[in-house]
């Protein structure tokens, strides 16, 4: 609206409300001199004033734009703009009004967006917008709104697009919080649309729920590509002035509504690129799942301050069952430094698809059907007409047919996923096996600190030490795309390390190298290998990650040798007193040789606390104190050492049962060790102790994703299911263990225990009959004793006790 027109309306309005109510109608008619549009606009404001009475807090002129939209709409209904006849108003906002119109030439419905005059007054900005809008109109993607025409009639600039039957994501979110499966489905489709746009150089700039449409058939459509270009380089209003005029109030509403989704670089007025859209999509996903945006504020400045200075609350605090890898995706998308975010939307899309595939693989057919129908049902409840209802019913039938006749293929592994297989010991002195294992573990550990990679834990890879399987089979079992093989030959103070990176699907060698170095250069070799692998897999490294993987844990070769020996004992599959004592011995020697060896202090603390909790070591006060002192020493030496933070958390969990403090340390460690299965495993135990079973299960699933063949982890998860009497799920976990260790007596006995719990004693007896446990197989012995008690055979009890 032109300033002169607005001034005329407000002048008449103020003069009118100063008169007695009975004189106002005639006065407005006189002042408007036959201008019916002007009369209706003034009367709308006067009626608002009269309805509010004496208690009004906001004057009518301050909300006038909202009142006048209605008047303007009445004026346009039935009129034509170009060859489009306007039928009704679909919506209005700071970027203009959208009308349902009919294309008189082609006889089809269209959505006609009329852009506000204040956004098209600047010829330079308008020219830039037109260029970008034309690029957007050339986009051909099922998730992008089709643009038919960009045009103008007089001073009215418009965009004609396909008309979408459905509701906006904003409308859906105002009714109820979205379930996880629906949110991921929408996120994948939106990310796919952005990927197509970014490939052509088009950046959206205004990604928010209002610009995402949900169709009844499950399709998602992204609107308004390039329109935000009109508002670039326009100053955000001075917040002290907001509300002083209606024009500024409208502008403030626009800024506040959009500010919640702005990237930090947008709020600073800096040049934006595709990574800004990645941030905005992260905000939208967070809001879909949490029900609230991650950044809040009563005013635009408050909201912007939140974006620039605060971290969003963890999703797990709002929704305990949220997958941990979804938390990781959002944490990466919402990094304030754009260099630390996903660098392309395709990377984010791949992670979203992997997560969606994992969740679907875990679900059953009825759940798949329910998810397919969910979005449709929400839209259908708010749409009119038989055709839409029929379309939704057909979609539901199709979803059911699909879920009935087809089985979804397993999701392909992440291209940036890797497992470091056990290295071959080629030293003449075979007692150097611990050194070979240590080199493998150090390379794996350095890789695991790169958030952009998925790295399988050593517990799972060690089971391939004497492998006979094809590499493709191993990769499939571990859920990775790439494998690292290697060998180590140690002779006196010289070492030769040979490594080769292999793409498992086709057995192609991506990279290979041989390093001949002195023992004192071992850390630089491990760093070079980690960096080379990251480069080959195109993983993004932050500056902090580069420093971490280049770190030298000690400058004392003898201390490092002792540490590797202790590490070897701590990683043995069997948790026995002998292995715990062996680890203690060498780790104590390592920190004695180098008191500044923080990594060794951290591992010593973990070994002590684990032994204290499991009773493999005598749970004495002295042992508990050593665990505490070792963890605190490690943190004093290196406050940002992830292993030290985890050790301190495990001490609080295992020795003190101080779960709140334990979780705090575990969450800090998790930021530094994104691929450590030990951290979600520890969080699973804490949640289980607290009775938070759903959260515990989510943590177990996350740990198993990183350590899929860890029999101790799988057994612990199965035991949770047993406690909950979810016996079919427990049996599936025990079967996974038996796939790895077919003759494990305790696992076979646990399957018998489930039969006992279900009251099927003959089946339990049949499972126990072939088992001949020795004194170390305590679980199997206990279950056999319980079977004898249930069968009332006391003579069988005494020998086993």
Image (cartoon, helix red, strand yellow):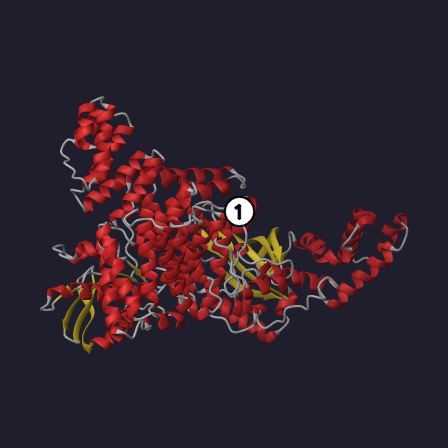
Nearest to the observer: residue 207 or residue 434: 434
Nearest to the observer: residue 300 or residue 466: 466
Nearest to the observer: residue 63 or residue 564: 564
Residue 498 x, y percent position in the rendering: 17, 71
- Could you say which quadrant of the image residue 399 lies in? top left
- Could you say which quadrant of the image residue 42 lies in? bottom right
Q: Residue furthest top?
A: 792
Q: Residue at 76% across / 52% down in the picture? A: 44
- Could you say which quadrant of the image residue 440 lies in? bottom left
On screen, 362 above or below 553? above
Residue labelled with disc 1: 172
Residue 456 x, y percent position in the rendering: 28, 57
Nearest to the observer: residue 475 or residue 495: 495
On screen, 731 above or below 320? above
Can residue 195 be seen in the rendering of this structure?
Answer: yes
Q: Which quadrant: the C terminus?
A: top left
Residue 735 as seen in the image, left or right of residue 599: left
Total number of numbered labels? 1
Residue 134 as seen in the image, left or right of residue 259: left
Local packing at callout 1 (Cα closer than 10 Å; few below 14, some 14-19, many 20+) is some
The kind of secondary structure element at disc 1 is helix
Residue 264 x, y percent position in the rendering: 53, 67
Q: Which quadrant: the N terminus?
A: bottom right
Residue 334 x, y percent position in the rendering: 47, 62
Can residue 364 be seen in the rendering of this structure?
Answer: no
Q: Residue at 20% across / 28% down in the picture? A: 797
On screen, 72 above or below 519? above
């Amino acid at each position: 609206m032109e300033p002169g027109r607005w001034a005329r309306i407000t002048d008449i309005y103020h003069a009118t409300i100063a008169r007695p109510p009975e004189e106002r109608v005639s006065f407005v008619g006189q002042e408007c001199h036959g201008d019916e549009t002007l009369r209706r606009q003034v009367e709308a404001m006067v009626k608002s004033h009269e309805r509010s009475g004496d208690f009004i807090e906001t004057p009518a002129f301050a909300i006038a734009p909202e009142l006048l939209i209605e008047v303007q709409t009445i004026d346009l209904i039935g009129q034509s703009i170009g060859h489009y006849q306007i039928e009704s108003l679909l919506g209005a906002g700071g970027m203009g009004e959208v009308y349902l119109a009919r294309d008189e030439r082609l006889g089809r419905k269209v959505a006609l967006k009329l852009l506000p005059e204040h956004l098209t007054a600047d010829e330079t900005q308008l020219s830039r917008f037109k260029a970008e809008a034309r690029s957007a109109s050339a986009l051909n993607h099922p998730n992008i709104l089709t643009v038919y025409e960009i045009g103008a009639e007089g001073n009215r600039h418009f965009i004609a697009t396909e008309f979408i039957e459905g509701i906006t994501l904003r409308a859906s979110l105002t009714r109820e919080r979205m379930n996880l499966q629906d949110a991921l489905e929408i996120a994948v489709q939106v990310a796919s649309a952005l990927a197509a746009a970014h490939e052509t150089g088009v950046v959206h700039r205004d990604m928010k729920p209002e610009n995402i449409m949900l169709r009844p058939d499950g399709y998602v459509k992204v609107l308004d590509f390039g329109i935000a270009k009109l508002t670039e380089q326009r100053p955000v209003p001075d917040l002290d002035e907001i509300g002083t005029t209606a024009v500024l109030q409208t502008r403030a509403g626009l800024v506040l509504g959009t500010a919640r989704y702005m990237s930090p670089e947008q709020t600073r007025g800096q040049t934006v690129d595709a990574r800004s859209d990645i941030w905005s999509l992260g905000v939208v996903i967070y809001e879909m799942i949490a029900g609230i945006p991650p950044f809040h504020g009563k005013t635009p400045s408050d909201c912007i301050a939140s974006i620039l200075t605060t971290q969003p609350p963890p999703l797990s605090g709002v929704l305990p069952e949220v997958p941990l890898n979804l938390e990781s995706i959002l944490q990466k998308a919402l990094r304030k430094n754009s260099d630390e975010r996903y660098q392309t939307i395709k990377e984010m899309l791949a992670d979203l698809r992997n997560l969606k595939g994992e969740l679907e693989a875990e679900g059953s057919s009825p759940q798949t059907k329910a998810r397919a129908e969910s979005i449709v049902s929400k839209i259908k409840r708010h749409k009119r007409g038989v055709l839409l209802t029929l379309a939704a019913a057909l979609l539901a039938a199709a979803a059911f047919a699909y879920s009935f006749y087809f089985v979804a293929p397993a999701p392909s592994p992440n291209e940036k996923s890797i497992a470091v297989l056990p290295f071959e010991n080629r030293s003449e002195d075979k007692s150097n096996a611990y050194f070979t294992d240590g080199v493998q573990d150090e390379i794996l550990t350095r890789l695991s600190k790169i958030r952009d990679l998925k790295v399988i834990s050593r517990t799972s890879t060690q089971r391939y030490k004497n492998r006979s399987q094809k590499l493709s089979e191993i990769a499939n079992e571990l859920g990775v795309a790439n494998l690292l093989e290697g060998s180590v030959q140690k002779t006196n103070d010289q070492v030769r390390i040979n490594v080769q990176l292999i793409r498992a699907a086709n057995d192609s060698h991506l990279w290979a190298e041989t390093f001949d170095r002195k023992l004192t250069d071992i850390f630089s070799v491990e760093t070079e290998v980690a960096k080379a692998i990251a480069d080959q897999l195109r993983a993004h490294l932050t500056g902090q990650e580069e420093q971490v993987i280049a770190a030298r844990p000690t400058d004392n070769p003898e201390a490092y040798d002792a540490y590797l020996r202790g590490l070897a004992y701590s990683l043995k599959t069997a948790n026995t007193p002998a292995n715990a004592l062996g680890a203690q011995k060498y780790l104590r020697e390592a920190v004695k040789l180098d008191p500044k060896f923080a990594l060794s202090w951290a591992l010593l603390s973990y070994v002590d606390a684990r032994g204290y909790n499991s009773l493999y070591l005598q749970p004495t006060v002295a042992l508990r104190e050593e665990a505490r002192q070792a963890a605190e020493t490690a943190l004093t030496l290196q406050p940002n050492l992830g292993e030290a933070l985890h050790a301190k958390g495990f001490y609080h969990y295992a020795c003190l049962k101080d779960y709140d403090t334990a979780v705090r340390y575990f969450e800090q460690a998790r930021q530094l060790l994104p691929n450590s299965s030990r951290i979600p495993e520890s969080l699973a135990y804490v949640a289980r102790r607290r009775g938070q079973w759903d959260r515990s299960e989510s943590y177990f699933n996350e740990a198993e994703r990183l350590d899929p063949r860890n029999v101790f982890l799988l057994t612990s998860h199965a035991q949770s299911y047993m406690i909950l009497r979810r016996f079919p799920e427990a049996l599936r976990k025990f079967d996974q263990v038996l796939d790895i260790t077919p003759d494990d007596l305790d696992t076979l006995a646990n399957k018998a225990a489930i039969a006992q719990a279900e009251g099927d004693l003959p089946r339990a007896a049949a499972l126990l009959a072939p088992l001949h446990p020795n004194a170390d197989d305590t679980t199997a012995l206990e279950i056999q004793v319980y079977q004898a008690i249930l069968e009332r055979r006391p003579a069988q009890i005494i020998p086993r006790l």
